[in-house]
Image (cartoon, rainbow, N blue to C red):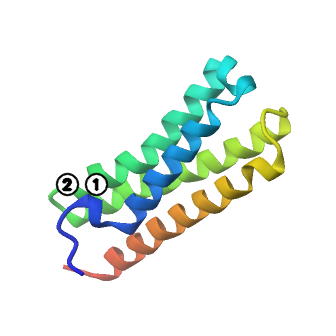
Amino acid sequence: MKVEKFEDLNCWKEARVLVKMVFQLAQNKKLEKDFGTRNQLTRAAVSVMNNIAEGFGRYHRKEFIRFLDFSQSSAAEVKSMFYLLEDIEYATTNELTELHLQVDKTRNLTLGLIKYLDAKKE
């Protein structure tokens, strides 16, 4: 399958799922009242998805890779915040299990695309 738009990228599709899951989590009563933490988490999740799209729109492959790297690092930030939510008892380990799996899946797909593009020398 030829990728013609960012919506065709599996990493973007999975990032979209991640964002939806994070926004659903953000409706948690404790998190809903903590604007700073909620804002940081949702902005980082949106950054995962949007950096993939923005990088795809760049003209040069190197720029695309740079934005994919921003995306995967934002995914790492989201994952780190999941541990914070558990530690401060905003969410349980069980509540976060699917979120951890989704962020890992998204990040791994993004890293895979980076490796593919990096190996594909112009």
Say which quadrant the C terminus sits in: bottom left
Q: Secondary structure at mark 2?
A: loop
In the image, 29 versus 49, the foreground residue is: 29
Q: Where is residue 57 drawn, in percent x and y?
A: 20, 54
Mark 2 residue type: Arg
Residue 58 vs residue 16, the one in the foreground: 16
Residue 91 at x, y percent in the picture: 78, 39
**Circle 2 is placed at which residue position?**
58
What residue would you read off at disc 1? 55
**Which amino acid type is shown beneath numbered disc 1?**
Gly
Q: Residue drawn 46% across and 60% down?
A: 14
- Residue occupying image coordinates x 65% and y 50%: 79
Residue 28 place in picture, x, y as percent: 69, 30
Quarter of the image for residue 13 reads: bottom left
Q: How busy is the neighbourhood of tag 1: few (under 14 within 10 Å), some, or many (20 plus)? A: many
Q: Work out which quarter of the rendered image holds the N terminus and state it.
A: bottom left
| Residue sitting at x 43%, y 43% | 47
Above or below: residue 114 compared with residue 59:
below
Mark 1 element type: helix
User: Circle 2: is it few (<14), some (14-19), or many (20+) Cα within 10 Å?
Assistant: few
Where 95 sits versus 43, above or below? Answer: below
Seen at 35% across and 55% down, the residue is 52
